[in-house]
Image (tube, rainbow, N blue to C red):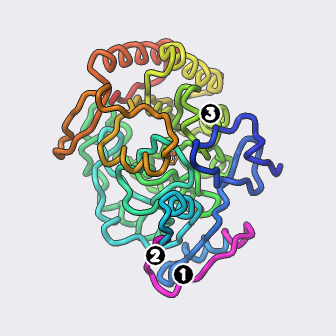
Amino acid sequence: MVLEDALTDPHAAAPAQAAPVDATPIDAPRETRLWRPRRVVVTPAALEQAHGRAMVARAEGLGLAVERLKSNRITATRDADPRQAYREAKATLAIVVAPPTKLKLQPIPPSADWRFDLAEGCPAHCQYCYLAGSLSGPPVTRAYANLDAILGNLDGYLGNGNVTSAQGARAREGTTFEASCYTDPLGIEHLTGSLSAAIRHFGAWDAPVQLRFTTKFAAVAPLLALPHRGRTRVRVSVNARAAARYEGGTASLDARLDALGALARAGYPVGLTIAPIMPVPDWPQAYTDLLRAASRVLEGVHDLDLTVELITHRFTPGSKEVLQGWYPGSDLPMREAERTRKLTKFGSVKYVYPRDLMQAMRETISAAVARELPGARLLYWT
Ligand code: SF4
């Protein structure tokens, strides 16, 4: 393995303007950067769990000091400077036990029947991070030690979904479980091993089920030989090249696409999550180029099972406020006057692109998917 410097990697995504890249390399293959948290803590309750102890061993095996906490509460950093508090939280991995509420799963349309969490938080610095609207408090990454309970809990949801299970076109996917709503599970896999355990769990689960996750990272080598038995669909989260400047601390687009090809060749059902779609300069060509690059890495894959999900950029008043606090120097366009205000089904406000632009992007990019990736199933546009 080659020890690489993320900051000199010419293909690395540009760091967010106001946020330093905390993802420094350990022992990584080319173009793959592994996060090295500056602080790792473990709670007493997590140490009672075999998986909690395994995560501690992983971290210590990578040369990281692990602080044993006296209480099960993770106290947020008290720094008065919000930028410093953000930086410290983003550089912290906490090994904890998931609260009982995490065992009561929620539907997650249009992606999957159910959402479950192996962790919460992510070490990267995307200026349009979807977590901004859903996480509360400083963005510490919490990895859950009670993995057996989390995976064992899924049984009770088999056959009960209202998303893929209820749609004729997707029924063959079985009951689907999405693991990347509150984290990027691949971005922390070298420290947790939780994703590999989940893939094995679904591979051994003799039922019509599917594990789903999407990622902006690329260190897939440890996943390739796992006994997945086609029950895990891995999607890479990608965007037009012009958006790379908004995705600090992630793997480069080329590394993500290479990872997609490697996973497809290892027999995984795969997918592209194209998100968040934005009208970047010459967006029809920019998204066509992206689809062509994906097509190239998938060339020659036998029995390719490929899906595409198209997600446009949107924001809420709450997510905008959080993101502007995290990335005060960002030039990501989030002007309400240029958007259409909509109410979600829960009655909260979100801002999406105006109808004509939405329609033009939908028609053009959907047509490009059909043209450049004719074997792909387009799951949804949102
Ligand atoms: S990789 Fe995903 S979860 Fe992590 S910061 Fe970026 S958008 Fe957020």
Nearer the camera: disc 3 or disc 1: 3
Which residue, given by chain and number where applicable, does mark 2 sit on?
Answer: 75
**Is residue 262 something that shows in the picture?**
no
Which residue, given by chain and number where applicable, does mark 3 sit on?
Answer: 253
Three-letter amino acid code of the residue under disc 2: Thr
Left or right of 222 on screen, residue 2: right
Pick the residue in front: 258 or 314: 314
Residue 313 marker: none
The residue sitting at the front extreme is 80
Secondary structure at numbered mark 2 = loop
Q: Position of residue 217 (x, y in %)?
A: 60, 44
The residue stretch that appears in magenta: 59-77
Q: Position of residue 245 (x, y in %)?
A: 58, 34
Q: Main secondary structure of the magenta part?
A: loop
Marks 2 and 1, Cα distance to the nearest angstrom?
Answer: 18 Å
At 28% from the left and 50% from the top, the residue drawn is: 107
Secondary structure at numbered mark 3 = helix
Nearer the camera: disc 2 or disc 1: 2
Ranked by sequence position, the earlier of labels 3 and 1 is: 1
Quadrant of res 254: top right
At 58% from the left and 52% from the top, the residue drawn is: 187
Image position of 232 with respect to 261: above or below: below
Quadrant of res 84: bottom right
Nearer the camera: disc 3 or disc 2: 2
Left or right of 294 on screen, residue 312: left
Which residue, given by chain and number where applicable, does mark 1 sit on?
Answer: 47
Marks 3 and 1, Cα distance to the nearest angstrom?
Answer: 37 Å
Q: Position of residue 141 (x, y in %)?
A: 51, 62
Q: Position of residue 119 (x, y in %)?
A: 47, 61
